[in-house]
Amino acid sequence: MLKDLKMTTNNYNTGNTIFYVCFLAAELPSQLISKRLGADVWIPIQMILWSIVTICQFKLGGRHSFYACRALLGLCEGGFIPDLILWLSYFYTSAELSIRLSFFWTAMYFTKIINYLIAYGILHMRGVRGHAGWQWLFLIEGLLTLVVGISAFFLMVPSPVQTKKPWNPKGWFTEREEKIVVNKVLRDDPTKGDMHNRQGLNLKMLVEAISDWHLWPIYFIGLIAYIPENTIESYMTLLLRDMGFSTFHTNLLCIPYNFLRIIMLLLTTWLSERVTNIFGTALIQPLWTSVCIGVLRFWSGNFYEKWQTYALLTVFLSVPYIHAMMVSATSRNSKSIKTRTVGSSLYNMFVQTGSIISSNIYRTDDKPLYHKGNSVLFAFALLMFPTLIATKYFYRRLNSKRDEIWNNMSDQERDEYIATTTDKYSSRLDFRYAH
């Protein structure tokens, strides 16, 4: 595609940066719209909008149209994941949510595998009606997304007690099942009953949610955690092409690491719930990335021994993906619908800021070995160790201080505190942070 559009690696970086900046700018507004319209309405609208932009990429003619489409895609896709997380939180408890989120990202990786297989066939269409294979790929993927977006209007529901539709008069649950779901969710988190799913946030609520400093350590993790893997994954096809693999083989060679990442994602998320240790389990990620990036940076055969380099990149990109765990931690430690709504967006905004950084680490003047870029990635991988350990200590310390105060109170004092306190949500003495 770069050759057809007469673009360089730096142009590609600029396009990705534009996408992430627009994605970032759309995050919070998208969440506010979602809270007003309802996630079941806004999510399908988002999917339809970005499918239309994807289809329009069929007519890309150069870097300026590439930049424009990347900007529009960022605006349309921004907020999609936090919107979906908020919607799922209506149906599941905190412990259930992290596993369901791992299923969501598993589906995403399965989709990538299918896309690579489809791309292998579609890219052979180069020359059909005078168009390149990548143009047909954008067109077909956009049409498929459009079908899914339209279908979502009919499949998504506002909440567990609002599942009946004219085309589905029986709904998803019986009346008894609805009560079970609602009671289960509210017992886990009573604050989920504070706001209905069409209630928007006012400025005061927004400021309160943003100023909840207890979530800031998780936001910082979101900023730095995925920079190494995002950088390598964004350039994987270009790196393989530079090493001499054909376009068609490159698509097939990207399948194994996605399959392995699915396994690692599910195992790591399950383990974190099994041992009830989110940030301790997450240490597997920097251990994995620092070893792989260290070899990639200091190994003399880097990018010269193509099959060995491919094996190393595949192992690296099979890294345990901790995103589901961090999103779940944000949701659990928010302890209210409004902070959960804004917190999910803020976390994802920091993740996208990290993506902007990752889009500018590999530069044209650093090719073909990317020694400078890999040194930066190695530093980010090492930085994750103290960050995760400090975050674990931070939440344990907060819980210990509250335990000390709470245990020194009499039953009467506790009852009086619960009845009269002005402390809200995660600031309450009877709230404990997940870590």
Image (cartoon, rainbow, N blue to C red):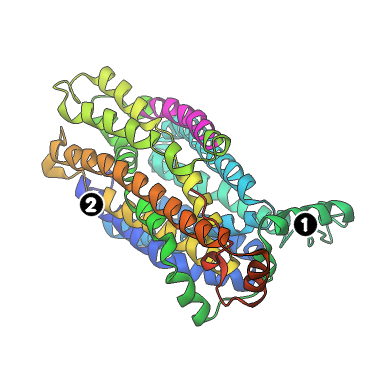
Secondary structure beneath dot 1 equals helix
What residue is rendered at 41% in x and 45% in y?
135
Q: Which residue is mark 2?
A: 11
On the question of residue 429 being in view, the answer is: yes
Q: Circles 2 and 1: CB distance less than 8 Å?
A: no
Q: Position of residue 91 (x, y in %)?
A: 70, 54
Q: Which residue is mark 1?
A: 183
Which mark, residue 193? none
Q: Of 269 and 149, which appears nearest the observer?
A: 269
Would you call the spot at circle 2 few (<14 residues within 10 Å), some (14-19), or many (20 or more)? some
Q: Main secondary structure of the magenta part?
A: helix
Q: Secondary structure at mark 2?
A: helix
Amino acid type indicated by mark 2: Asn
Quadrant including the N terminus: top left
- Region of the chain picked out in magenta, as a range: 250-269
Q: Indicate which disc, 2 or 1, sits on the residue closer to the N terminus.
A: 2
Q: Note whether 180 is above or below 122 in the view shown.
A: below
Residue 331 in the image: state x and y as whole percent: 54, 56
- The quarter holding residue 281 reads top left
Side (left or right) of 264 relative to 87: left
Q: What is the quadrant of residue 211 in the picture?
A: bottom left
The residue sitting at 49% across, 55% down in the picture is 399
